[in-house]
Image: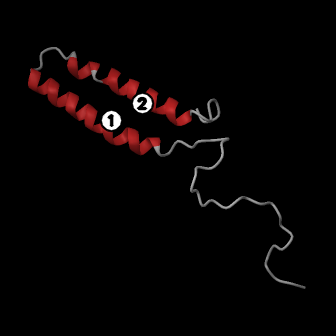
């Protein structure tokens, strides 16, 4: 996903995760032979897991190809290897 839509990976991932969460509610809500209280409990459990996992996993999606976020203290990567080892001769 990060290779296909690098600038929008987090947004696409979040939309897909929320869509899967909504679709996963179909199981508990359409269960035959179970009481309304159990259906509500199953739906609450689905929503609780989704509300926990989606934000946590959303943090693992990297935003690529764009500038670093404002306030980022990331040092620029250099490939200058002229003084590897730190010693002088």
- Which residue is the extreme one toward the bottom? 89
For the N terminus, the quadrant is: top right
Q: Position of residue 19 (x, y in %)?
A: 39, 24
Where's residue 86, x and y in %? 79, 79
Q: Residue at x 83, y 67 (%)?
A: 81
Q: Residues within 10 Å of mark 2 (few under 14, many from 20)?
A: some
* Residue 24 place in picture, x, y as percent: 32, 24
- Tell me whether circle 1 and circle 2 mark residues in contact (CB < 8 Å): yes
Judging by the rendered image, the residue that carries numbered circle 1 is 50
Q: Which residue shows up at 44% across the image and 42% down it?
A: 57
Element assignment for label 1: helix
Residue 16 or residue 39, whichever sits in front: 16
Q: How many marks?
A: 2
Q: Say which quarter of the image contains residue 25.
A: top left
Residue drawn at x 22%, y 28% is 43
Extreme residue toward the right, this view: 89
* Residue 36, quarter of picture: top left
Residue wearing tag 2: 17
Point out residue 67 in the picture as x, y percentages from the top left corner. 66, 46
Residue that extends furthest to the front in the rendered view of this protein: 70
What is the CA distance from the residue labelled 1 to the residue labelled 2? Answer: 8 Å
| Quadrant the C terminus occupies | bottom right
| Relative horizontal placement of residue 41, taking residue 8 as reference (left or right) | left
Q: Is residue 74 left or right of residue 11?
A: right
Q: In the image shown, does 60 or 73 lie closer to the viewer? A: 73
Secondary structure under tag 2 reads: helix
User: Dot 1, how many residues are within 10 Å of its Cα: few (below 14), some (14-19), or many (20+)?
Assistant: some
Q: Which mark is residue 13?
A: none
For marks 1 and 2, the one nearer the N-term is 2
């Amino acid at each position: 996903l990060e290779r296909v839509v690098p600038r929008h990976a987090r947004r696409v991932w979040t939309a897909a995760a929320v869509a899967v969460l909504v679709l996963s509610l179909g199981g508990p809500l359409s269960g035959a032979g179970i009481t309304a209280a159990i259906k509500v409990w199953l739906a609450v459990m689905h929503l609780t897991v989704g509300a926990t996992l989606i934000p946590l996993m959303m943090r693992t999606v990297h935003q690529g190809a764009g500038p670093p976020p404002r306030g980022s203290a990331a040092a620029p990567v250099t490939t200058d290897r002229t003084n590897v080892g730190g010693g002088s001769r």
